[in-house]
Image: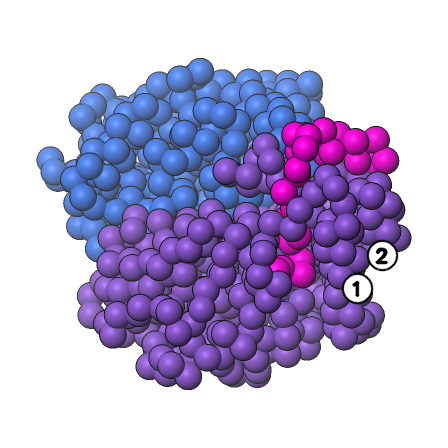
Chain colours: A purple, B blue
C-alpha cells in the first residue's frame, strides 16, 4: 500500500535500510549520554541545518511531538498575550493550548479554506507572540512566505513562531525573519511518529528566561533554558526518542544528497499535476479557491457527486491510500499528501485514476 | 555487544523480529486515528494489564517518557503540596519537577545507598500526593512493597504515586494500594526509548478535574482528563510514538507467554548470583548495605582498588557493557542492569569475569 495520507504517511524510502543499521549499531542500547549518541545528535542537527538553511545561531532541539511544542512555546514565550491566526483545526488547537495555559490568547479567524491578508490583521499592541500556521493540515491552506516577512516588518517587536508541521522542509523560509519554527517528522520527512523538532533563536531563550525570572513557571525538563543547556552539549534533558533522532539525521542526509532544490522542484511538479487534475475532473473541486493560499504539500479537494469514501476505497483498489477530510470535511473531502517520499509515478497513477 | 546498562539497555531479544513485522504491517504509515491503530493500542494495554496485573478500573495511558510523567503528575495531582522521598538523583529530579511547577514540595532525604523506614517519615497533614521512587536507578536502592502498603495504611487520605521506571514489571505490586505508577520502556522492557507508560485510577482523574475546576492549569494535550477521554477510545491526544506502542504490546505479549513468574524467578536467580559474586570478590563491594533495600533489577557495586573504568573496559573486552556509577558514584561504582532480556548465561559469564 502507498500512503498518500497527510501524516502519518508513507515512510521515506530509505527508512527501512537505516532501521537495520540502527540495530546493528546498537543505537537503541547505547547510553543517551554517551559520546556515540552525542555524535548522532550533532549529525542530525547539522543535517537539518543544511537542509533547511537554518542559521548557525538558531538552536535546534527535540521534543516528542509538534503538539508538545505548542505547549512549550506558550509556556516559554508568552507571559500574558498571544495572537493566533486561525483557519483550521490545527491553528485552532494551537490557540486552545494558550487558553488552557491561562494566557490572554487573541485570535483572528477566517473560514475554512481561506487565508489571511496581512493588512487586515488586528493585532493588539500588547501581543508578545504571533502564532502562525504556515500550512494548515486540515484544510490545505498555506501562508505565503512573503506574508510572514511582511508581518515581521509590521511587528518587529513581537516574537513570531511558525508551525511548519506538514510543509517542512519544502518552504524556503528565511529564518532570520522569524524567531521560532517547528515540525514533526511523520509528515514530509517520512519517519515514524514520536519526534518534534523545534528551531528557535536567542530572543526566544531570553524571553523564556525573563518569564522564569519573574517567578512564573515555564515548565520543567523541556523549558527552553534546559533544552538549550543540554543541546549545547549535544544532549537532551530526558532519555529521548533516540531511534527517531538517528533516523531523522539519516533521512535529512539522504535528502541533502538528493538536493533540496530537486525535492522542491519535484514537489512543485506533483502539486501542479494534482491541482490540474482536480480542476479538470468532474468528480472533484479544488477546496482552496485563492491560488496563492494553496498548499503544495497537502492538497485538499471537495468530492462533488459521490461520498469521499467512495473514491478513497476506489483508490485503495490500486494500492493508493489518500487521506479523508478533517473535521467538518470528513465526509466530503479528500486530502492528498505531496511529500518527498511520494514519487512522480504514484502521482501520475493517482491522476489517471482521478480522471 | 551485550548491554547490561541500566537504561537504555540491551533490546529485548524479540524486538528486531517485531520491528520487521511493523514495517510489513505499515504500523508507521497508517493513521493514528484508524481502527487498525486503535486495535494496536487496545492490544498493548491489555498485555500490560495482564503482565502487571493492573485492575480493570485503572487507566493505562502513554506519554513520551517517564520524565514527562513526573511533570504531568505534579501538574494534575498537586494543587499545593507534594511530599517526596529522596535518596538519589531520580527521586531528587522528581522533587525538582514539583519545585519548578511552583508547588510546596516537601522532601525527606536520606544518604545515597540508604532506604527509608516508614515510621520515621514526617509527612505534613496537608500533603496531597506522596511521591515514591520504588527503584532508585542511580543507587540501586529499592523500596519493599510492604513499605508502600504500610504507607497507604498510615495515609489513606493521600494519593500515592510510584516511580517504577527501572523495576517494572518485576515488582508484584498490588495496584489497589496505590493510585498511580509509571515506567519507561527502555529499561526492563528492552525497547527503544521514547515512550512512558502511566497507570492511574479514578481518584487521580477526579483530583485533576478538581484542580482544573478551581481555575488552575493542569496542562494541555496531556492533562489527565484529555488522556483518559482519548484512551477510552483507544486513542491518544497527539500523534504518539506509534511504533513504540506497537513494540511494547508485542514484547509484553512475549513476556506473558514466557510467564511473569518465570521472569521474576530468573530475575531473582541472577540477582542472587550477582550480589553473591560481589560479596565474594576482592575488587567489589555491595553498595546498598541493608539487604532489604537492595534492588533486584539495578545492582550497584563500589569498586574497591581500581577505578570503575578499569573494570568497565575489562568487561567490554568480553562483549559486556555494564553501567558506570551515576552522579557522585561515576568514577567509583558500576551499575549492572538485571532485566528480563539479560540471560542467565551472560550473568554467569560476568560473574566469572568479576571473580
Q: Which mark is residue A344?
A: 2
> x, y (%) of residue A322?
72, 41
Find residue B114 and report its image quarter: top left
Q: Is residue B48 magenta?
A: no
Which residue is tagged 1? A269
In the image, residue B84 above or below residue A74: above
Q: Dot 2 falls on which chain?
A: A
Q: Which residues are magenta?
A: A294-319
> Pointer 2 and pointer 1: residues touching (CB < 8 Å)?
yes
Tell me the SS state at disc 1: helix
Expressed as whole percent of the image width and height from the top left, the position of residue A101 reads 29, 52
> Is A185 drawn above or below residue A7 in the view shown?
below
Residue nearest the viewer, comparing B233 with B135: B233
* CA neighbours of label 1 inside 10 A, class few (<14), some (14 to 19), many (20+): some
Q: Is residue B131 left or right of residue A247?
A: left
Residue depicted at x 20% and y 23%:
B156
Amino acid at each position: 500500500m502507498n500512503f498518500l495520507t497527510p501524516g502519518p504517511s508513507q515512510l521515506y524510502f530509505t527508512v527501512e535500510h537505516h532501521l537495520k543499521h540502527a540495530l546493528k549499531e546498537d543505537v537503541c542500547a547505547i547510553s543517551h549520554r554517551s559520546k556515540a549518541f552525542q555524535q548522532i545528535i550533532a549529525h542530525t542537527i547539522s543535517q537539518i541545518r543544511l537542509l533547511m538553511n537554518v542559521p548557525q545561531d538558531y538552536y535546534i532541539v527535540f521534543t516528542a511531538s509538534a503538539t508538545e511544542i505548542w505547549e512549550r512555546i506558550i509556556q516559554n514565550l508568552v507571559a500574558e498575550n498571544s495572537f493566533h491566526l486561525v483557519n483550521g483545526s490545527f491553528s485552532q488547537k494551537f490557540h486552545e493550548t494558550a487558553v488552557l495555559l491561562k494566557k490572554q490568547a487573541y485570535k483572528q479567524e477566517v473560514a475554512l479554506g481561506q487565508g489571511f491578508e496581512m493588512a487586515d490583521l488586528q493585532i493588539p499592541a500588547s501581543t508578545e507572540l504571533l502564532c502562525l500556521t504556515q500550512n494548515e493540515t486540515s484544510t490545505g491552506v498555506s501562508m505565503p512566505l512573503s506574508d510572514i516577512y511582511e508581518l515581521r516588518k509590521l511587528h518587529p517587536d513581537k516574537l513570531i513562531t511558525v508551525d511548519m508541521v506538514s510543509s517542512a522542509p519544502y518552504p524556503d523560509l528565511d529564518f532570520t525573519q522569524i524567531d521560532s519554527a517547528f515540525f514533526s517528522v511523520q509528515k514530509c520527512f517520512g519517519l515514524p511518529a514520536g519526534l518534534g523538532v523545534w528551531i528557535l533563536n536567542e530572543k526566544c531563550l531570553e524571553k523564556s528566561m525573563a518569564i522564569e525570572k519573574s517567578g512564573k513557571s515555564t515548565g520543567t525538563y523541556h523549558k527552553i533554558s534546559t533544552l538549550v543547556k543540554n543541546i549545547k552539549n549535544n544532549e537532551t534533558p530526558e532519555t529521548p526518542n533516540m531511534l527517531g533522532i538517528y533516523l531523522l539525521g539519516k533521512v535529512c542526509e539522504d535528502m541533502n544528497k538528493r538536493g533540496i532544490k530537486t525535492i522542491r522542484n519535484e514537489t512543485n511538479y506533483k502539486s501542479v499535476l494534482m491541482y490540474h487534475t482536480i480542476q479538470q475532473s468532474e468528480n472533484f473541486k479544488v477546496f482552496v479557491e485563492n491560488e496563492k493560499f494553496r498548499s503544495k504539500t497537502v492538497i485538499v479537494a471537495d468530492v462533488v457527486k459521490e461520498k469521499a469514501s467512495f473514491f478513497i476505497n476506489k483508490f485503495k483498489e490500486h494500492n493508493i491510500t489518500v487521506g479523508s477530510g478533517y473535521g467538518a470535511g470528513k465526509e466530503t473531502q479528500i486530502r492528498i499528501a505531496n511529500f518527498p517520499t511520494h514519487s512522480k509515478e504514484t502521482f501520475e497513477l493517482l491522476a489517471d485514476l482521478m480522471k
